[in-house]
Image (spheres, rainbow, N blue to C red):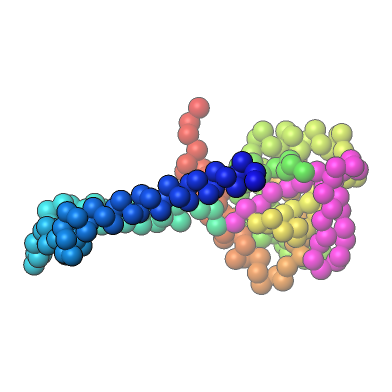
Amino acid sequence: MSTLATGERGGSRRWHERLARVGSWFSVSNGSRGWEAVATNVKPLARTTGATPVLRWALAGLGVALLLAAGCRTVSDEHRPAAIARFYLETDAPHGVPVVLPRSGVQIVIGAKPVFTEYDLTHVEVAEVELGRCLRFQLTGEAARDLRRMMHVYPGRRLVLLLNGDPLGARRIDAALSDRAILVFVELPDEELPRWTEQLQRTTAQLRRSAKPL
């Protein structure tokens, strides 16, 4: 017989012997009233009509915690950006990310990181040009300098606009591109442009209010 089987049998025998000793203790010490004696020695809890002081303090603490959680949730909702606009540069690198514009079906491979983010924008508005309505993104001074460098280094490549993570427009880098603003035809219905402009402006205002002075 294996050692494991012998150990299991020995352990089982010791367990039954322990149960026998416990049973004999109840039968010898308390007679036939073994479990009844144990039950009668247990004092019942006093019945109370109201919450104990400890329970009242616990409930009060729970209420305060719920109020604080609700307050934090309200503050976070108020400071959550309404809409996020980011620009990505077209790339021919093997690690690029392919995106597809929703209406035209044009596929463009972009870099993994944005070249302009919501922090680089100072104003967003709907602009009317010869070809129709578009969105005009005004850049900060530092972002405008970066755009000028891109015009010299990456002429002909496209800047792809993502709104809340969705690719919705592209603008080619050429001589007609202003060095202080980016005009993009967004592949959305014209009636939706004012709503997007309002949300993007709200995000810009929130970021400017929360910006700390240097």
Give 75 or 178, whichever is nearer the viewer: 75
> Between residues 91 and 45, which one lies in front from this camera angle?
45
In the rendered image, which quarter is residue 96 located in?
top right
Q: Position of residue 158 (x, y in %)?
A: 84, 48
Would you say residue 98 sits in the magenta stretch?
A: yes
The residue nearer to you, when weighing 20 against 207, is: 20
- The span picked out in magenta is 83-111
Residue 60 seen in render: no
Q: Residue 188: x, y in percent?
A: 73, 67
Query: In the displayed structure, does residue 129 sit left or right of residue 164?
Result: right
Q: Is residue 24 visible?
A: yes
In the rendered structure, the answer to whether residue 201 lies left or right of residue 85 reads: left
Q: Residue at x 66, y 52 (%)?
A: 85
195 falls in the magenta region: no
> In the image, what residue occupies the spot 38% across and 50% down?
17
Q: Residue 116 location in percent, x, y?
A: 70, 42
**Which quadrant would residue 175 be assigned to in this image?**
top right
Q: Position of residue 114 (x, y in %)?
A: 73, 43
> At x 12% / y 62%, what residue is drawn?
40
Q: Residue at x 47, y 41 (%)?
A: 210
The mark total stands at 0
Q: Residue pushed farthest top?
A: 214
Q: Is residue 66 left or right of residue 189?
A: left
Q: In the rendered image, which quarter is residue 136 located in?
A: bottom right
